[in-house]
């Protein structure tokens, strides 16, 4: 006999189409989110309304239909493709006798499942508690009966069943811990800036192939799976460009359409780390029918984070899955790559070099022994590619910025 813990929950997906956005595309994405959370999207129910019902989200007739489907098909969980009020959750649960979660709770749950770093876990827990606080009237009996499950990871059912005062206390503790981590990250960022480290961030829609690209360029060993939010915590690795210049490559959490503001707020500090990079790569899955929507989602977030003054490279990934004529027709002006095969990555590296914040120059030098201290300065402030001691001094190949170039130009050969 399969226990509750081993059984894959069967989910009924519910959507109200008000015409305000592409409801079908959002519902398709919800299916992928449900799968990523470890449930089976068994059935889908949609209803066209001018606006959702304030008490039950769907109309009374549709709610009755949902109840009958849940009873006939042994549905364990109702997932609604919108953010619900506490009253709506309570009314739907009381009528159907099935636990209800909304889109935000589902995404928070996946984030809790994927978080690995201390900061990631703290951010997820804080976001969950903020969202949970006004929703403490949920179906606690059923949650205890199910023994947790989707929508209860992270803080979990024990915290849901505690009082508001305890939750508020925990939230204050989390904020203090996150503030300390953010302060530490700020110090590291200032250290990088002082040391002249150039940062390049990969941002984009979830499942666009950011981790695959990171692994191809740096052998970072980042988890790369065909799942939404496979990577949650940012990863940084050094990348040496063809010219010899080294940059810091940063992989970031993926985005989704209608990303709940709770999550944008929770991960703002992490996203700002990417936003403050010298160069931003906006990576998109070109093989997706929603490619242009995905690009728009990312661009909107980057704009909200104030990235307008930084070079943003629009890069289309998975182009090996597209027919060439469609690429030329739809995406002619963008950089086209396949992070899986490496196709086009050389063009991406060229674009990164062309947008470096300080123009770097590769030089061949012959430095007299009397001035050999300049070699140490190059090693410290630039990139020393090679050095050889010859009769007249030190022969070197190096990459230097404009300031350093003025010091070494007299030794060029």
Image: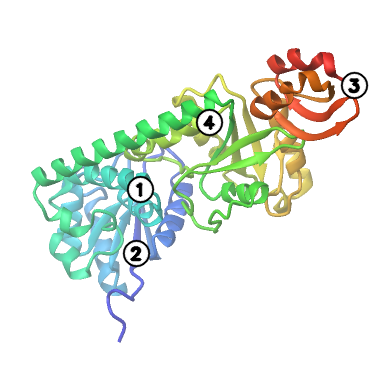
Quickly name the residue at label 4: 299
**Image location (x, y in percent) of residue 115:** 39, 52
Per the rendering, the mark at residue 130 is none
For marks 2 and 4, the one nearer the N-term is 2
- In the image, taking residue 67 as reference, residue 232 lies left or right, namely right
Q: Which residue occupies the foreground of this view, 391 or 97?
A: 391
Outermost residue, bottom side: 1
- In the image, taking residue 92 as reference, residue 311 lies left or right, namely right
For marks 4 and 1, the one nearer the N-term is 1
Dot 1 crowding, Cα within 10 Å, few <14, some 14–19, many 20+: few
Name the residue rendered at 56%, 26% in the picture. Answer: 195
Dot 4 crowding, Cα within 10 Å, few <14, some 14–19, many 20+: some
Mark 3: which secondary structure? loop
Gap between marks 1 and 3 measured at Cα? 51 Å
For marks 1 and 3, the one nearer the N-term is 1
Question: Residue 145 sits in which quadrant?
Answer: bottom left
Q: Which residue occupies the foreground of this view, 108 or 244?
A: 244
Q: Which residue occupies the foreground of this view, 65 or 385?
A: 385
Dot 3 crowding, Cα within 10 Å, few <14, some 14–19, many 20+: few
Quickly name the residue at label 1: 118
Question: Residue 372 sits in which quadrant?
Answer: top right
Dot 2 crowding, Cα within 10 Å, few <14, some 14–19, many 20+: many
Quickly name the residue at label 3: 413
Residue 159 seen by the camera: yes
Disc nearest the viewer among 2 and 3: 3
Kindly check if marks 1 and 2 are in contact, taking CB atoms under 8 A apart as contact: no
Gap between marks 4 and 1 measured at Cα? 28 Å
- State whether residue 377 is above or below residue 385: above
Gap between marks 1 and 2 measured at Cα? 31 Å
């Amino acid at each position: 006999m399969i226990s509750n813990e081993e059984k894959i929950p069967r989910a009924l997906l519910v959507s109200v189409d008000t015409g305000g956005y592409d409801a079908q595309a959002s519902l398709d994405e919800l299916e992928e989110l449900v799968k990523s959370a470890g449930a089976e999207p068994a059935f889908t129910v949609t209803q066209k309304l001018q606006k959702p019902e304030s008490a039950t989200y769907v109309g009374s007739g549709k709610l009755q239909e949902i109840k009958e489907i849940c009873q006939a098909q042994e549905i364990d969980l109702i997932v609604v493709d919108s953010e619900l009020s506490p009253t709506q959750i309570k009314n739907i649960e009381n009528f159907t006798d099935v636990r209800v979660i909304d889109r935000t709770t589902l995404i928070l749950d996946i984030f809790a499942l994927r978080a690995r770093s201390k900061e990631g876990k703290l951010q997820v827990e804080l976001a969950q508690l903020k969202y949970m606080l006004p929703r403490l009237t949920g179906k606690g009996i059923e949650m205890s009966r199910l023994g947790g499950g989707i929508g209860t990871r992270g803080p979990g059912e024990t915290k849901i069943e505690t009082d508001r005062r305890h939750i508020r206390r925990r939230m204050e503790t989390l904020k203090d811990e996150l503030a300390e981590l953010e302060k530490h990250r700020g110090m590291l960022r200032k250290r990088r800036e002082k040391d002249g480290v150039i940062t390049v961030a990969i941002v984009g829609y979830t499942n666009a192939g950011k981790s695959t690209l990171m692994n191809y360029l740096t052998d970072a060993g980042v988890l790369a799976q065909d799942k939404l939010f496979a990577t949650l915590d940012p990863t940084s690795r050094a990348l040496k460009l063809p010219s010899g210049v080294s940059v810091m490559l940063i992989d970031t959490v993926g985005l989704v359409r209608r990303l709940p503001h709770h999550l944008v707020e929770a991960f703002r500090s992490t996203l700002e780390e990417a936003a403050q990079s010298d160069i931003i790569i906006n990576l998109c899955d070109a093989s997706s029918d929603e490619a242009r929507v995905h690009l728009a989602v990312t661009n909107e977030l980057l704009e909200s984070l104030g990235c307008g003054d930084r070079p943003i490279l629009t890069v289309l990934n998975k182009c090996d899955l597209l027919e060439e004529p469609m690429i030329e027709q739809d995406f002619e002006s963008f950089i086209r790559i396949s992070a899986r095969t490496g196709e086009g990555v050389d063009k991406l590296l060229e674009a990164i070099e062309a947008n470096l914040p300080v123009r770097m120059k590769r030089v061949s030098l012959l430095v007299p022994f009397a001035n050999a201290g300049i070699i140490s300065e190059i090693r410290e402030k630039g990139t020393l590619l090679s050095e050889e001691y010859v009769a007249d001094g030190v022969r070197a190949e190096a990459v230097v910025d404009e300031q350093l170039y003025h010091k070494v130009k007299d030794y060029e050969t």
